[in-house]
Image (cartoon, coloured by chain):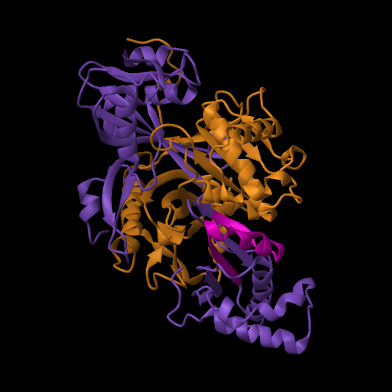
Chain colours: A purple, B orange
Amino acid sequence: MPPLPSGVCWRTVLARAHRARLSSGSRGASGDAGCAQDHPAVVGELRGELDRFGGVSVRLGALDRLDAAAFQRGLQAAIQQWRSEGRIAVWLHIPILQSRFIAPAASLGFCFHHAESDSSTLTLWLGEGPSRLPGYATHQVGVAGAVFDENTRKILVVQDRNKLKNMWKFPGGLSEPGEDIGDTAVREVFEETGIKSEFRSLLSIRQQHTNPGAFGKSDMYIICRLQPCSFTINFCQHECLRCEWMDLNDLVKTENTTPITSRVARLLLYGYREGFDKIDLTMEELPAVYTGLFYKLYHRKLPDKYKTMTLMD
Amino acid sequence: MPPLPSGVCWRTVLARAHRARLSSGSRGASGDAGCAQDHPAVVGELRGELDRFGGVSVRLGALDRLDAAAFQRGLQAAIQQWRSEGRIAVWLHIPILQSRFIAPAASLGFCFHHAESDSSTLTLWLGEGPSRLPGYATHQVGVAGAVFDENTRKILVVQDRNKLKNMWKFPGGLSEPGEDIGDTAVREVFEETGIKSEFRSLLSIRQQHTNPGAFGKSDMYIICRLQPCSFTINFCQHECLRCEWMDLNDLVKTENTTPITSRVARLLLYGYREGFDKIDLTMEELPAVYTGLFYKLYHRKLPDKYKTMTLMD
């Protein structure tokens, strides 16, 4: 949400808000006794910027001289001002060392939107009806690699050390922030098994909600088909109990596996027998419309004539 | 991360830590002057539980009587104790109204892991090397519906009111927390266009990182094929500038569209001409191994003989 060029300084808003509040005499807060301390020069460190969705975004800077009670009075006055101006939301960005301002904001109705590393963001909805503010990230993404060697019909499988004991599954793990699906698969396979591989296709996607392992958020678990580039196993003793190249038919037959591994093993057998084009989602980079950046798009292979056609019927 | 049954009370840890610190006389903190106030009866409200990964999880309860400086001294002593016991991490769960304890924790090295609504979670890594703690959700999930009417060869498209003006695209939006992919597509299509529809398949997945619209997190954008159940458009004037049933060939030909919409239009044309089984990822519910819950799995349609085979060769 980029701020408008016409961003306004919260100092002005606060000063105006204070004048308005003092003159109207309304909403006398219990903390009014200390109000004389709330000089605009102190709260002037706070800056608010309008965004194009009708919200106000406030970044708290260095506020060493401002106590929590004075902050709360200033924020309360500013909220009244923003309401009167028809603003629909307030975003409050707070560095972790300034977190003493969180509880005062919460007592005025703010909630956490998100927090990461050394800062938190709180929001207050001022519009009509329930909040229409966008939520924060809802999913973790895990990726497993089904490393299949067509020449030997063998597939790389592991047994977890910590959970799902005796269950054969594909090596995998959580994506790092900013990591592409295929890169996670290749990295996790190498870290767990010592096998080098290359991304070939995306095979399946699983969506699961309220996942305890995801701190109650949702989980997207993606399995990729990888082509092995090395074959000597050197597995991570910390994560894995066993690791081996297993005949694909044996993985299809075994009961010591998870439903999803068994299903993808059958999918691989189908692809092995009748062509991987039957099971693959191929990957391509395409340009984003505005940013000029590229993203990765996965779908069924599209014949060239459809990709390039410009006129038809 | 479920706590071990052998959860320990932080009160005990703290009391022991205090005795150890006072007797050794080491690490005299600048705040030691007030140490006499940190009676175990005060800090006894804090409880810590061990988890099966070697971490300690502390939930701050009602600590109305504890000031931030006393909390910091108690936490510092407890950290020393946990270190000496070989704990590898501390998780600190703080209700929003107790946020005055965040900055003191941060000054001891804690960072935000995440925060939502009325609480935050901070972590401190005590193990060797860089932190191996799992991250929080990294992706938002957006879903669009390609509502295609096979009888008329028409596809439902919209033009956004706020962005991508004059660009035809499929109606869609962000998933609500806990919402299945197909349900998001059907809901968003109805909210934007008034058209009722049913989920048929998943067509494509796009992954994009450091997305400004996702607060810098990653974005997963999924397009589903939907079957229309109603045909009279009643579009949302707030979100859309235009909405219409467009001949699929026209959408393939137009330049007023995004690369991803054009690509999926071509994919749909391929499916329309040569069979939707060429482009679809079908959905099925499967049971989770331990929880007994079900999840949704998407992959290429698997012939029945592969699904049910038990022995082969």
Q: Is residue B232 above or below residue A259?
A: below
Q: Which quadrant of the structure image shows residue B169?
A: bottom left
Residue that appears at 53% across and 71% down: A57
Q: Is residue A125 above or below residue A301?
A: below
Inspect the magenta stretch and tell me whether residue B118 lies in it: no
Total number of numbered discs in the rendering:
0
Residue that appears at 78% across and 85% down: A25
Q: Which quadrant of the structure image shows residue A299?
A: top left
**Left or right relative to A93: residue A196:** left
Q: Nearer the viewer, residue B295 or B188?
A: B295
Whether residue A155 appears in this view of the structure is yes
The quadrant the C terminus of chain B occupies is: top left
Q: Which quadrant of the structure image shows residue B16?
A: top right
Q: Which residues are magenta?
A: A89-114
Q: Position of residue A296 (x, y in %)?
A: 31, 49
Q: Position of residue A90 (x, y in %)?
A: 59, 70
Whether residue B195 appears in this view of the structure is no
Q: Position of residue A53 (x, y in %)?
A: 52, 73
Q: Nearer the viewer, residue A211 or A20?
A: A20
**Left or right relative to B132: residue A232:** left
**Left or right relative to A92: residue A278:** left
Q: Nearer the viewer, residue B194 or B154?
A: B194
The quadrant the N terminus of chain B occupies is: top right
Q: Position of residue B277 (x, y in %)?
A: 38, 39
Residue that appears at 72% across and 84% down: A21
**Left or right relative to B209: residue B8:** right
Q: Nearer the viewer, residue A290 or A13?
A: A13
